[in-house]
Amino acid sequence: MNTLVVICHPNPASLTRAAADRVVTAVEASGRPLRVLDLDELDFDPRLTDFEVRHHLGDPADRPDLAEHIEALQWAQRLVLVHPTWFSGHPARLKGWFDRVWMNNVAFVLPPGASRIRGRLHNIRRIDVVTSMGSTRWVNIAQGDGGRLRVNRTLRVLCHRTCRIKWHTVTDVDNRSSAEVAAWLDSLTEQFG
Amino acid sequence: MNCLIVHAHPNPDSFNHATRSVAVDTLRQLGHRVDVIDLYAIDYQPCLTEQEHVDYHSLVEQGPDDVVAAHMQLLAEANAIIFIYPTWWSGLPAILKGWLERTMLPGFAFALVSDGPAAKALKVRPRLTNINQIVGITSYGSSRLDVRILGDGGRRTITRAVRALCGTGTKCSWLPIYRLDSSSDDQRQGFLDTVAERLTSLFPPTGTHPDVNRPKRGSA
């Protein structure tokens, strides 16, 4: 299964980065085709531009700066998102990756006369989300749970109709013992191997 | 009242900008102070940096960068925050999401406190208790029904996560326009009129209502 790992965290010493290392190492060891988009290393600009808004039904050919991202997204069968949960959702850089890369003729099409967009990412059959959050599950729900809703509903309908989603979440992370965090990291090695 | 408008749209000719002009003009005519943070116009950098993450819990004491500090000052002086933005992928544009991440810092927008020595976990306490009102003005490409089904994460982020920083008694109002792409000129003009009317009823003219600037319930 072609696996695309998208990583988003500014701090190399963070738990998210440690989790990303585990995922990448495990997929490499399994021998499955792997691509990695490290949004911070690439210094990905998450701000949808004036041009992109004016041409929001434009074509990927007009976005040479996003070509690497678009090509990887269309190549992937398994999409793995590795990021912290901030304000109950995706960090700005990752949100902007959706805003800019999941564009017309890549993630969706709007057929003439249609009132709803139709998904185009039928290549994606599985999404894994690896995330840590400072709050508990219940606090995150109280704050809106925006990240989970976006993946499970808004993005999933653009993918293959049988696309499965698995969340690998560690909650309340500041109050966890180091043994619990280590066990979570070990579970990633197992699940992505 | 001091109203802080936080605006996120890259195209100055957009309907979103027209909405903002109506909001600014309406509030100023009513005698309120209006500050505008136009995130795209100031080329706002929305990504939390490595250093900001390393120093996150002491950033307020250490002094955040000049742009963040200026925005914190505006927030501290505000009685109302008005967010104006387009909804993209069920949420806030990245530039606005990042503004929350960089500006709503611990020790400023909220505090992490321990309930006595026996308590194990730190709890979040609101610090933006000066904010009496939150208003969201946003456009959706989808219909109202589809937005309901898909979850409306942006609205939740503002009416739950941001509101939680303001404490109890803060009023949230939502002014949406659905299916913007297929809306007629009449519908758009109707929405601009609605924005002006709603803001006028939410923010009565200064001086006419002596209770307008009264501290909200629950604030110190």
Image: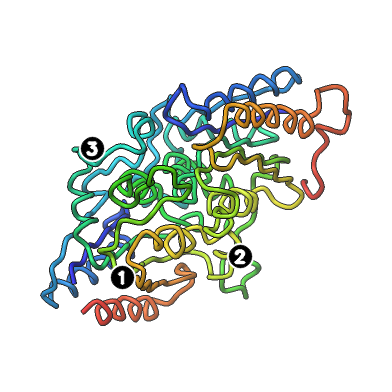
Q: Measured along the vertical axis of the image, is residue A3 above or below residue B27?
A: below
Image quadrant occupied by the N terminus of chain A = bottom left
Q: Amino acid at mark 2?
A: Ser
Residue that badge 2 annotates: B114
Residue placed most toward the observer, B97 or B61: B97
Q: Is residue A172 left or right of residue A9?
A: right
Residue that badge 1 annotates: A126
Tell if the residue under mark 2 belongs to the same chain as the one under mark 1. Answer: no
State the CA–CA distance, disc 2 to disc 1: 40 Å
Residue placed most toward the observer, A82 or A69: A69
Could you say whether the residue bearing mark 2 is in a helix, strand or loop?
Answer: strand
Q: Give the total of numbered labels.
A: 3
Q: Measured along the vertical axis of the image, is residue B205 above or below residue B92?
A: above
Q: What residue is drawn where x is 89% and y is 28%? A: B210
Local crowd size for mark 1, using a 10 Å CA cut-off: few (<14), some (14–19), many (≥20): many
Ranked by sequence position, the earlier of labels 1 and 3 is 3
Residue that badge 3 annotates: A63
Q: Is residue A166 visible to us here?
A: yes
Residue B99 screen position, x and y as percent: 47, 40
Q: Amino acid at mark 1?
A: Arg
Q: Amino acid at mark 3?
A: Arg
In the rendered structure, the residue with mark 2 lies on which chain? B
